[in-house]
Image (cartoon, grey):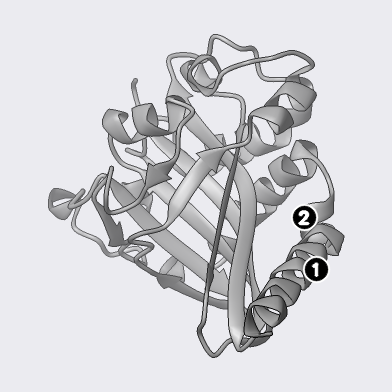
Amino acid sequence: MRAICIWTVILAFGITLSATPVFAKGLQDDVNQAATIIERFQAVPEKGIPQTVLKDARGLAVLTVIKAGFGFSGRGGKGVVVARTPQGWSGPSGIGTGGAGFGLQIGAEVTEFVVILNTDAAVKAFAQGVNVQLGGDLSVAAGPIGRNVEAGLLPVAAVYTYSRSQGLFAGISLEGTVIGTRNDANATYYGRTVNPEDILSGKVTPPATADRLRKVLAKYTVLAKY
């Protein structure tokens, strides 16, 4: 009986995520959402991602995650990852994450995440098209916040992570989180089968519909010499 109840909750959770506007549409909506999230994070520079972090970033992953449940808890999220190339920022590659547990979560909570890829190895991990475990495959740390960050102290991890929930912004560790490639979403978005390595290396020309995201990235990251 208990097993039946658990699977009922799992099914209900999946239906809730698929019916939620954040998760019900395709990659273009994730691309637009990523641009908006970056703008929100940087709206208050004193509490945003430091410029010293952004200007040297090799890539960024931006995710919207919903955590929901009643006794049994689960979460699902999706977004995009982009990388710096000799021609500027790459086109977006779709990514997603999910998980389940037995925490005391009641109701639902939406959290936005920005993951800074500090190294070429971090970008390569996302480009391989397999699941990436933060803290396992890549070292991860809660990112520093605000203007006054000593450049000489950075980076201390391959990946920095930040979150925004209910208007509250913070550096947060996502150690143990697994992020995977959404190949079907990429194929639909680009109109053909593409692999994340070609997207993130710049071999795949970004569509015009990614222009807003790339302009936002250029504005806030101040493209450094590749």
* Closer-to-camera residue (7/191): 7
* Closer-to-camera residue (10/182): 10
Q: Give the residue number, with chain letter if any, for mark 1.
A: 16
**Residue drawn at 53 percent across, 59 percent down:** 113
Q: In the rendered view, does 76 fall on the left or right side of 116?
A: right
What's the CA distance linking mark 2 and mark 1?
Answer: 9 Å
In this rendering, the answer to whether 97 lies above or below 205 is: below
Neighbour class for label 2 at 10 Å: few (<14), some, many (≥20)?
A: many
Image location (x, y in percent) of residue 32: 74, 44
* Label 1: which secondary element: helix
Q: Give the residue number, with chain letter if any, for mark 2.
A: 23
Quadrant position of the N terminus in the picture: bottom right
* Label 2: which secondary element: helix
> Do labels 2 and 1 touch, CB within 8 Å?
no
Image location (x, y in percent) of residue 29: 79, 44
Marks 2, 1: nearer the viewer? 1
Disc 1 marks a residue whose amino acid type is Thr
Which one is earlier in the sequence, the residue at label 2 or at label 1? 1
Image location (x, y in percent) of residue 138: 27, 45
Quadrant position of the C terminus in the picture: top left
Image location (x, y in percent) of residue 110: 66, 71
**Residue drawn at 35 percent across, 59 percent down:** 176
**Residue drawn at 30 percent across, 41 percent down:** 118
Q: Tell me, for residue 210, which label it has, or none.
A: none
Q: Quadrant of residue 146 in the image?
A: bottom left
In this rendering, the answer to whether 134 lies above or below 148 is: above
